[in-house]
Image: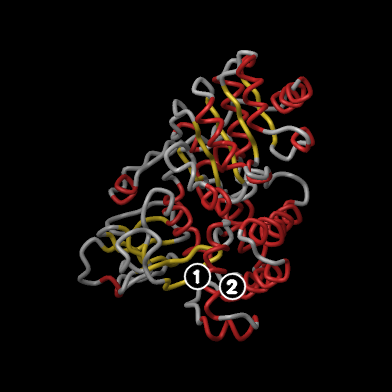
Amino acid sequence: MEKLQISFDAMLRPITPSFHRYMFDRINWNNRMIGLVGPRGVGKTTLMLQYAKEKLNRNTTLFVNADDLYFSSHHLVDLADEFVKRGGSHLIIDEIHKYKDWARELKLIYDYQADLKVYFTGSSILDINKGSVDLSRRAILYSMQGLSFREYLNLFHQIEIPVYSLADIIQHQIELPDKFRPYTYFKSYLETGYYPFSKEDQFYIRLQQVINKTLEVDIPQYSEMSVSTGRKLKQLLTIIARSVPFKPNMSSIATMLRVSRNNLSDYFLYLEEAGLIAQLRDGTGGIRGLGKVDKVYLDNPTLMSCLGEELSEVGNIRETFFLNQMRVKHDVITSAISDFQITDYTFEVGGKNKKQKQLQGIENGFIVKDDIEQGYMNVIPLWQFGLTY
């Protein structure tokens, strides 16, 4: 355990409290078992380390990586038992999905160690959901996505803007810092700003590595797929990147990939839950995720820049940004008359010359325009939808 403590100290040293992701204050840290899940690279590990450094007693806290060599000859449940005997109160486990039988051992820890709080992260929401059956009454799961435009401004440009609700944005209740010009930063955010590691050298190479690991390791391993199926997923993502947004023709795509049409909808769902694509559904299901898929997008504009390169069309980027930012707090579905619908609100997304014709006579219809700084009446600047988390 001493080596694990030394590793923990080494990871804490570079952690700074200057910026917190949106999920930091949304998590109820009083729960006995908390899981933070989401795509690779969105900052889950950093968030946990920040909380440990700022809020917990170092002497009674331990942070471990489930991939550590220590666990080649030790069990999590035994570590927890020894840690509690030494006075431990908080055990944080990073990348829990890399530990075999993680769900069973977390269940045992919860049942046997009533005085221990356990927080864990998982790079693949697929695996966490798959293994959470036994944990459904024990672990509270939180799902985190990448940086909002507001967070990007704070983290990389030290521009602080408060969180605004959708109602604030629609009613033009936005107050901005003096001399703030959003389009000085917005294009850079769309191209590279979604991931917290975007300022590191060779960012697109690093992002491509994240994509490859997700496709070749995470999804096949934890969805019990073969390696060859993982390669099919990579081909499918390439097709999507070159076509988005598009209405999926399952028969045509199945023929292109030489796979069963019956399996294809599962492949799309795997890609979506892994944070690589977003599927826009209609409202027929009544509950999030049950409606019929109307369009398929890449998950975020930065992925579009990495995968689509010069093929990324500006209209697609705008729609992807809107869907990506608004889905964190709202159920976004397709609109029969426009691009998107959120509860009773209808949104048509376009450039600064977008006309009102499509929304004439529509109550609660809004034109979302790119390349404008301020809104008026039912016209709202696109960038403002990046201020909601």
Q: Amino acid at mark 1?
A: Val
Residue 77 sits in which quadrant? top right
Tell me, yes or no, if residue 118 can be seen here: yes
Give coordinates of residue 149: x percent, y percent: 51, 47
Give the number of the disc on residue 296: 1
Within 10 Å of disc 2 (Cα), the crowding (few <14, some 14-19, many 20+) is many
Say what amino acid the circle numbered 2 marks.
Ile
The answer to which quarter of the image holds residue 223 is bottom right
Q: Quadrant of residue 379?
A: bottom left
Of 106 and 308, which appears nearest the observer? 106
Residue positioned 45% across, 38% down in the render: 140
**Tag shown at residue 270:** none
From the viewer's perspective, is residue 207 above or below residue 168?
below
Crowd class of label 1 (few under 14; some 14 to 19; many from 20; radius 10 Å)? many
Q: Are the residues at dot 1 and dot 2 in contact (C-beta closer than 8 Å)?
A: yes
Q: Is residue 181 visible?
A: no
Where is residue 153 drawn, in percent x and y? 55, 41
Looking at marks 1 and 2 on the same chain, the residue that comes earlier in the sequence is marked by: 2
Q: Which residue is mark 2?
A: 240
